[in-house]
Amino acid sequence: MDREPAMDGRRDGPALAGTTEVLPLADLVQLLVVNGRTGRLVLEGPGPGLLAFHEGRLVVARAGTARGRKAFLRAFAWEPVRFRWDPAEGPGEADPDLPGDVRGLVMEALVHRDELRRVAPDLPPPGTRLALAGDGPDRGPDPALAAVVARLAGGPATVAELLDLPGHADADLARAIVSLVREARATPAP
């Protein structure tokens, strides 16, 4: 981890930079929350990311194209991640779906990360285009499965596009995709 000297106008002291190999994201987020920090945690993983805090409350989360709760969960699944804390930056416009209890969200994110690791070996590569086989499967009671089926009913989509569906965690969508592919209810499309 590198520490940079404070610049004039910074209200929370020196900036902090490093990787999650040295300081896990869960520990870093909890440190910012417990100490009531305001600023932006800029993330560099498979895509750009940002976690913004206001007086220790998580108010903004971005990870690739995802926003809010989905982005927070996605960022925890990225490994390794380079980060830079910038206390001079304000948090920006708040995401309405972020809960007040960040500790609970951190625990959910760690479970989400573990579930993604479990299904990742069976998940087709992100650029793989999938289409429904035949008339397609019933949507069933699983909301993530229903979302994937509904999206594929509109035409082929890449695995990355399916994982970007709003309102569902990546792990839930990944499980739905793996289920459809295993059962040959979704197949690779040209």
Image (tube, rainbow, N blue to C red):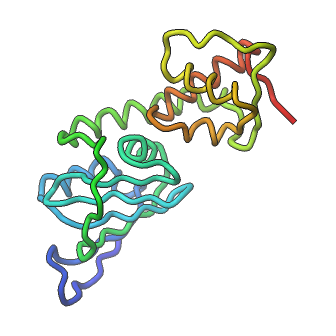
Estimate the x, y position of residue 18 in percent, counting from the top left.
38, 66
State the image coordinates of residue 27 (x, y, percent, origin top left): 27, 50
Give the residue at x 81% y 14%.
134
**x and y percent of residue 165 in the render?**
54, 37
Screen quadrant of the N terminus: bottom left
- Whether 32 is drawn above or below 178: the answer is below
Residue closer to the observer: 32 or 174: 174
Of residues 186 and 107, the one drawn nearer to the viewer in this rendering = 186
Residue appearing at x 42%, y 32% in the figure: 112
Q: Residue furthest bottom?
A: 8
Viewer-nearest residue: 83 or 147: 147
Q: How many discs appear?
A: 0
Q: Residue furthest right?
A: 190
Which of the 4 image quarters holds residue 96?
A: top left
Above or below, comparing residue 62 to residue 102 in the picture: below
In the image, residue 148 lies at what x, y percent?
60, 26
Q: Which residue does the image show at 76% across and 38% down from the upper left?
A: 128
Which quadrant holds the C terminus?
top right
In the image: residue 190, left or right of residue 6? right
Viewer-nearest residue: 52 or 111: 52
Residue positioned 54% across, 29% down in the render = 173
**Image side of residue 157 versus residue 80, left or right:** right
Which of the 4 quarters of the picture holds residue 50? bottom left
